[in-house]
Amino acid sequence: MKAKVHVTLKRGVLDPQGKAIAHALQTLGFAGVEDIRVGKVIELQLTSADETAARAEVEAMCTKLLANTVIEDYAIELVA
Amino acid sequence: MKAKVHVTLKRGVLDPQGKAIAHALQTLGFAGVEDIRVGKVIELQLTSADETAARAEVEAMCTKLLANTVIEDYAIELVA
């Protein structure tokens, strides 16, 4: 089973990487950009074929390692 | 208009960040992980309301700055 974990900064948390990209795009002449936020996608190939077990395992991975839950939100998407 | 750009490493390109995460998860006791690949999501808030124009602009941003097309693939998703 495959899982995708989307890790994004919470609202209100400053995103310096996004600000840097927005500035670089403006320098390149792209004027129509208001705001940019950058997140991560972690694609996991799991041995488990059971959806409930896989979701619980990925949930545990997120809280323990993949996301910093103080400043980041995560969303889990399972692909059969 | 909002756009999401998914930037992922091409198949066959080594992903040291993914390998490091997989190793860390195994150290933490998660045995059911076969492979991990890490990508980026860039969320852009655009002033343009026209979908065709927005897509063309984001496409240009991708080739010029957001993705390294030698080793990375990108996918554009527009949200009204």
Image (cartoon, coloured by chain):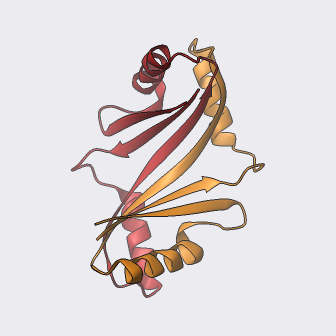
Chain colours: A orange, B red
Q: Position of residue A36 (x, y in %)?
A: 63, 34
Rendered view: A58 above or below B61: below
> Which residue is nearer to you in this view: B63 or A1?
A1
Q: Residue furthest left?
A: B12
**Left or right relative to B40: residue A69:** right
Rendered view: A41 above or below B47: below
Quadrant for residue B33, please give it: bottom left
Identify the residue shown where x is 69% and y is 41%.
A16
Quadrant of image for the C terminus of chain A: bottom left
> Which residue is nearer to you in this view: A48 or A44?
A48
Identify the residue shown where x is 48% and y is 17%.
B57
> Which residue is nearer to you in this view: A14 or A3?
A3
Q: Position of residue B77 (x, y in %)?
A: 44, 35
Identify the residue shown where x is 50% and y is 44%.
B41
Q: Position of residue A25 (x, y in %)?
A: 58, 22
Q: Residue furthest front?
A: B80
Quadrant for residue A37, please give it: top right
Q: Position of residue A11 (x, y in %)?
A: 73, 50
**Left or right relative to A69: residue A3:** left
Identify the residue shown where x is 67% and y is 68%.
A69
**Left or right relative to A70: residue A41:** left
- Number of numbered markers: 0
Quadrant of image for the N terminus of chain A: bottom left
Q: Residue furthest right?
A: A12
